[in-house]
Image (cartoon, grey):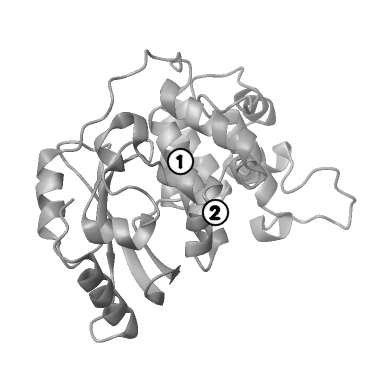
């Protein structure tokens, strides 16, 4: 398991973000000197952010735990972070020093309101996902589109629930399903990074990340990048084994009452070949219930 797998750390995120930003992109003159580090040096970043080099070094090394919102905003601007990365930076700084692992929680139960909404989406492939990417429920069309090779009732029992992150990295059928598997895998890891930032003491989440890191070199490499990504909406081309190639828009809707749970839908443009493929899949599914 990576050293920072259970929690994610502010210093590791800062180092990775600094390494990704070139002097040219940051507007820092290099004068043709040979650089021994990737990206910006610590003193260059501290100068851009308007903080002392010694303070930034202590912050990155975990020796300072009281970064003000103003300092965090200045670092975020200097690192050219997007909104999701800025929020992640603040969460890491807030959680710092309070990252003791908590006891294992009870198995998640799908929000009844989300399950009711799921049942009403008869023509839209959809599923309910929990905090750790476990599938808590899916409608028949969602199951048929994303995981027809699995048992339809798998989400009903905590011990057999599919985990979408595990499927993307460890399941050959799911890997083949996504035409651009790299884009999907980056989205999965980026979203897990955000989740770890919000829940640094979640032992089940740490176990999931450790397991994936040991079982998949692809996951381990992406996890080491420390990139975060909010996956609210994304288009994916699927190579479905039954209805052929189609493109869906994946949208993630978060429950207000249960913010760790999301309803994930997969829609297509009206009148498109992809819509016809979903219609055909719906006919094949027939009247089967979730």
Left or right of residue 242: residue 265? left
Q: What is the total number of numbered labels drawn onto the structure image?
A: 2
Q: Residues within 10 Å of mark 1 (few under 14, many from 20)?
A: many
Q: Which residue is mark 2?
A: 172
Left or right of residue 137: residue 40? right
* Secondary element at tag 2: helix
| Percent of width and height locating residue 283 | 21, 73
Identify which residue is drawn at 44% across, 29% down: 205
**Disc 2 from disc 1: Cα separation:** 21 Å
| Percent of width and height locating residue 82 | 47, 53
| Percent of width and height locating residue 187 | 48, 53
Left or right of residue 135: residue 239? right
**Nearer to the camera, 171 or 212:** 171
Residue 106 in which image quadrant:
top left
**Nearer to the camera, 158 or 92:** 158
Q: Give the label, 2 or 1, closer to the camera.
A: 2
**Nearer to the camera, 67 or 254:** 254
* Secondary element at tag 1: helix
Left or right of residue 17: residue 107? left
Q: Which residue is mark 1?
A: 192
Identify which residue is drawn at 86% across, 43% down: 36
Report the quarter where the N terminus lies: top right
| Percent of width and height locating residue 86 | 45, 44
Residue 130 in which image quadrant:
top left
Residue 174 visible in the displayed image: yes
Residue 79, disc: none
- The first of marks 2 and 1 along the sequence is 2
- Position of 208 relative to 238 (above/below): above
């Amino acid at each position: 398991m990576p050293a920072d797998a259970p929690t994610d750390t502010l210093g590791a995120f800062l180092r990775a973000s600094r390494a990704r930003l070139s002097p040219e992109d940051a507007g820092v003159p290099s004068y043709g000197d040979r650089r021994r580090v990737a990206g910006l040096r610590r003193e260059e970043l501290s100068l851009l952010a308007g903080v002392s080099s010694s303070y930034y070094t202590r912050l990155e090394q975990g020796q300072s735990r009281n970064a003000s919102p103003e300092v965090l905003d200045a670092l975020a601007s200097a690192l050219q972070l997007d909104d999701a990365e800025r929020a992640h930076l603040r969460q890491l700084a807030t959680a710092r020093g309070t990252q003791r692992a908590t006891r294992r929680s009870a198995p998640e139960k799908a929000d009844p309101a989300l399950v009711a909404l799921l049942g009403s989406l008869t023509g839209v492939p959809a599923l309910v996902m929990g905090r750790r990417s476990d599938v808590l429920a899916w409608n028949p069309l969602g199951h048929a589109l994303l995981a027809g090779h699995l048992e339809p009732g798998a989400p009903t029992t905590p011990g057999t629930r599919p985990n979408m992150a595990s499927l993307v990295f460890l399941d050959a059928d799911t890997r083949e399903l996504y035409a651009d598997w790299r884009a999907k895998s980056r989205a999965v890891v980026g979203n897990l990074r955000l989740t770890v930032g919000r829940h640094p003491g979640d032992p089940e989440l740490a176990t999931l990340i450790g397991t994936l890191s040991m079982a998949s070199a692809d996951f381990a490499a992406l996890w080491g990048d420390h990139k975060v990504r909010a996956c609210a909406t994304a288009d994916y081309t699927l190579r479905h084994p039954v209805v052929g190639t189609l493109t869906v828009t994946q949208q993630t809707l978060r429950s207000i009452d249960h913010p760790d749970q999301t309803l994930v839908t997969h829609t297509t443009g009206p009148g498109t070949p992809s819509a016809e493929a979903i219609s055909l899949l719906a006919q094949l599914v027939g009247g089967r219930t979730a």
